[in-house]
Image (tube, rainbow, N blue to C red):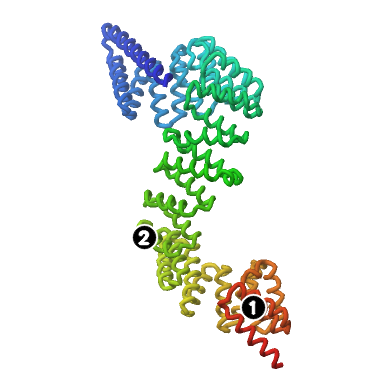
Amino acid sequence: MRESRIYAKGLILILYCLLLTHLQVDAQVIKKDNSPVIKDKEHYFLKGIENYNKRNLVPAKEAFTKVLEADPDNDAAYYYLAHISFANKDIASAEMFMKKAVEKDSTNYWYKNMLARLYMSQNNTEKAVETYEDIVRQFPKKTEIYYDLTNLYMGKKDVEKARATLDKIEMLRGKSESIMMAKFNLFRMSNDWDGALEYLSECSKQTNSPEIETILGDLYASRYQDSLAIIHYEKALRIENEYIPAIYGEAELYRRMGKNQIFFKKITPLISNPAVESRVKSEYLGQLLQQPNFVQNFKPQLDTLVDNFILAHPDDTTATYLASAYFAQTGNRPRCKELLRKISSQNPLNTNAKLQYLLFLYYGKEWDLLEREAKAATENFRNNMDIFELLGISQYHQEKFDEAVATYSSMKEIARMNNDTTAHLQCYSTLGDLYHEIGDAKNAYTNYKKALKIDPGYNPVLNNYAYYLALEGKSLKQAYKMSKKTVESEPDNPTYLDTFAWILYLLDKPEEAKEHLKHAMLYGGTESAAILDHYAEVLYALGEYDLAFIYWEQAEKKDKTLGIEEKVKERKEAINKK
């Protein structure tokens, strides 16, 4: 802010002097010859100033151009044209005009300063440094330039020149906290932490700065000199009792030392303070919650900490999301659900907020509530495929197949409007499955065929289509071809292996079927009652009765709805009759 005020005052003074000079000169000339050219120059200059101040840049540019037509050496006109070009983002023209202004008056501080800034805007560090060094030689007491020059030296990693420039500022203005911090940054840039510690320790004796004390605390903490670190954190807090970095630093040090009672005593008031920025607290709490042992050992204290965080920022979605994630992590699903519902209600048009809540219900398998919430959400999000899909999934799991068909049919129309072939493929695939559940084989196969027109190698459709044909005992050769494609592209997928093996079994190739089912067993097939049942059936066909009954027993334990107990009874009776 200081810089802009000086700039404004200086600019007003320059403009005043320029105007006064032009007026005086013009008056003298007019007395002699009353030249119309001089009158025009003065008229256009004033018009240019007037329009520029009103931000009417086009007429201002025209006026200053007219001035230069009458007076090609008018440095002020070049200066203003440079500003106008810069405002129009024409940096090349701005630089050209500013160079002209400096050429006409090389003693003008503001002209050279503007030129240096133009170089900086183009990341032309070398030219910027050269120009600022020239200004410093001409105007050695303009300390604001030293700061810019220091930053440029630091950008070039020229530590020595940066330090020398800061020494000049210190000589002109005396010691200040900003200079101390700038010098500390030079030590940090050089990775000279011993030098930084020594320098800041001296600064600590000369000034009362909570920032310097906190940095000293951090430096000692990084060296595990905990007692010295605490001394400096406490000094920072005596200077400014709510200095956030010092509170965080000291609290984290106590946590690291295992003094968790003191840690929670220090950190709780800070987390509970609404004046402290939510984002900073979210980042810190996020780091804490990533430490499983810490969360496990101090869950009651963290529950309180997170609750206080929410109370401090009740309308902050970042805080609420973090809290919901914490409660999900610690198994408090009701609290997590409450928070996600709150965010969703407070932000009814926020897609992400709505999806987070719906996905929570999905993972919790709360199908009835998911259906109601997703159906209501479709009113506000009429074209959101994710919300429609969650609605369809909830209906499927409740065996509301007709409603699910209607939902996926709506999704299909959205996909068509969006020209989204991937979504279209997914809709046809799911509709095929749903129609099969309803018992409408014709529509099921029609949708599968439409899906395969979009992607002939889409494995989920190839597998389901083939399996349902096999269950009906129809078109086994066609089913074989489709299923073979799936196992060729995903040879370790137990579901695809099972389908292919069952088709081989139906084609009276039990030996080949057995090999594929054995492979499926190695890749998760033992977790599926249906695959275990098929394997047992194949083994039975091959006469491996004992092994077949073992696998049927396993299948029965996993799913008692398959009717395996009755099947086993019948098969054993058939064996006894042989």
Side of 388 where 564 appears, left or right = right
Q: Is residue 123 above or below residue 17?
A: below
**Secondary structure found at label 2:** helix
Task: Give the quadrant of residue 530.
Answer: bottom right
Residue depicted at x 57% and y 45%:
295
Q: Position of residue 148 (x, y in %)?
A: 51, 20
Residue depicted at x 66% and y 22%:
194
Label count reads 2
Numbered mark located on residue 261 in the image: none
User: Do callouts 1 and 2 mark residues in contact (Cβ within 8 Å)?
Assistant: no
User: In front here: 204 or 506?
Assistant: 204
Q: Position of residue 516 (x, y in %)?
A: 69, 74
Task: Give the quadrant of residue 415.
Answer: bottom left
Mark 2 highlights which residue? 376
Side of 149 where 53 appears, left or right = left
Q: Amino acid at mark 1?
A: His
Q: Position of residue 562 (x, y in %)?
A: 57, 78
Q: Amino acid at mark 2?
A: Ala
Side of 570 where 58 appears, left or right = left
Q: CA distance from mark 1 to mark 2?
A: 43 Å
Q: Is residue 257 above or below residue 485?
A: above
Residue 335 visible, this orientation? yes
Numbered mark located on residue 534 in the image: 1
Tell me which numbered mark, 1 or 2, is placed earlier along the sequence. 2
**Secondary structure found at label 1:** helix
Q: Is residue 541 above or below residue 362?
A: below
